[in-house]
Image: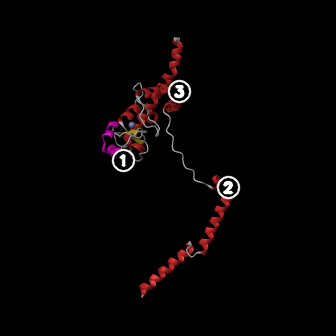
């Protein structure tokens, strides 16, 4: 490759990195402001506070102390967002129990740069298998996923990756659901007619017998009246 074209190829990624850095800088600024509004000097101070310990406990309890991505025992809580609603504990929606390995993989990219919180959530989802897939990804598979991400971008990589894995490990088949015989599936007019007739018959009988809803109500009324009469004597 010519030096110029190398530079041209590198340009978009340089721009991307600059944009990312700007975004994260803005993000930390917003977090600092939200924390100051809550009376915390720094994020470290926040993390050491009783306030955070209590929120953390609530999140663990909600998630049964399980990693939301791989199901291992959770030891940390991941912030999907640092808005004041989340930081104040008013909402737990953006807080997820995670295990150390998932959090580590999610928080830092291959170059050791911090990912944005929401990107980290996406990544942890990506590297962890769908529910039906019963094992964790191997190191080689995670690297393969990383390659695909670089080549194809986020969403496409995930699709391609799981297609690859699924092709090798076919998804276990669910047992077929037993179909309930419906009037349609019976397909026979006589059967439908028979069903209709039986329903009508049942309805008529209910009207005639002194056990229908209305009659039952009247009976209970009479019983109550009789009881009251007995009580008065
Ligand atoms: Zn995990």
Query: Residue 54: horizontal and vertical position, in percent?
Result: 33, 46
**Above/below status of 187 relative to 49:** below
The dot on residue 61 is 1
The dot on residue 152 is 3
Q: Specify the quarter for ligand 1.
A: top left
Magenta: main secondary structure: helix
Q: CA distance from mark 2 to mark 3?
A: 53 Å
Q: Residue at x 44, y 28 (%)?
A: 141
Residue nearest the viewer, comparing 227 with 30 = 227
Q: How many marks?
A: 3
Residue nearest the viewer, comparing 184 with 37 = 184
Asked whether disc 1 touches disc 3, contact meaning CB atoms under 8 Å apart, the reply is no
Query: Residue 142: horizontal and vertical position, in percent?
Result: 43, 28
Which badge, 2 or 3, is on the more N-terminal residue?
3
Identify the residue position indicated by label 2 in the image: 188
Q: CA distance from mark 1 to mark 3?
A: 38 Å
Q: Can residue 42 be seen in this snapshot?
A: no
Q: Residues within 10 Å of mark 2 (few under 14, many from 20)?
A: few
Q: Can residue 232 be seen in this snapshot?
A: yes
Query: Residue 102: horizontal and vertical position, in percent?
Result: 39, 34
Q: Residues within 10 Å of mark 1 (few under 14, many from 20)?
A: few
* Element class at badge 3: helix
């Amino acid at each position: 490759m010519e030096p110029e074209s190398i530079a041209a190829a590198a340009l978009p990624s340089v721009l991307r990195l600059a944009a990312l850095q700007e975004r994260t800088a803005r993000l930390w600024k917003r977090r600092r402001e939200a924390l100051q509004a809550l009376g915390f000097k720094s994020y470290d101070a926040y993390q050491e506070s009783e306030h955070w310990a209590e929120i953390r406990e609530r999140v663990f309890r909600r998630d049964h102390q399980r990693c939301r991505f791989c199901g291992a025992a959770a030891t940390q809580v991941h912030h999907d967002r640092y808005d004041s609603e989340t930081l104040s504990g008013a909402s737990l929606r953006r807080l997820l129990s995670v295990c150390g390995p998932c959090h580590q993989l999610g928080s830092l990219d291959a170059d050791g740069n911090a990912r944005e919180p929401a990107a980290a959530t996406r990544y942890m989802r990506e590297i962890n298998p769908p529910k039906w897939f019963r094992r964790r990804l191997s190191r080689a598979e995670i690297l393969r996923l990383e390659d695909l991400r670089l080549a194809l971008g986020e969403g496409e990589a995930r699709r391609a990756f799981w297609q690859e894995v699924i092709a090798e490990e076919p998804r276990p088949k669910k047992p077929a659901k037993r179909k309930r015989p419906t009037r349609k599936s019976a397909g026979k007019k006589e059967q439908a007619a028979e069903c209709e007739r039986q329903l009508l018959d049942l309805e008529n009988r209910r009207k005639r017998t002194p056990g229908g809803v209305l009659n039952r109500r009247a009976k209970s009324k009479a019983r109550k009246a009789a009881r009251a009469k007995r009580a008065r004597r």
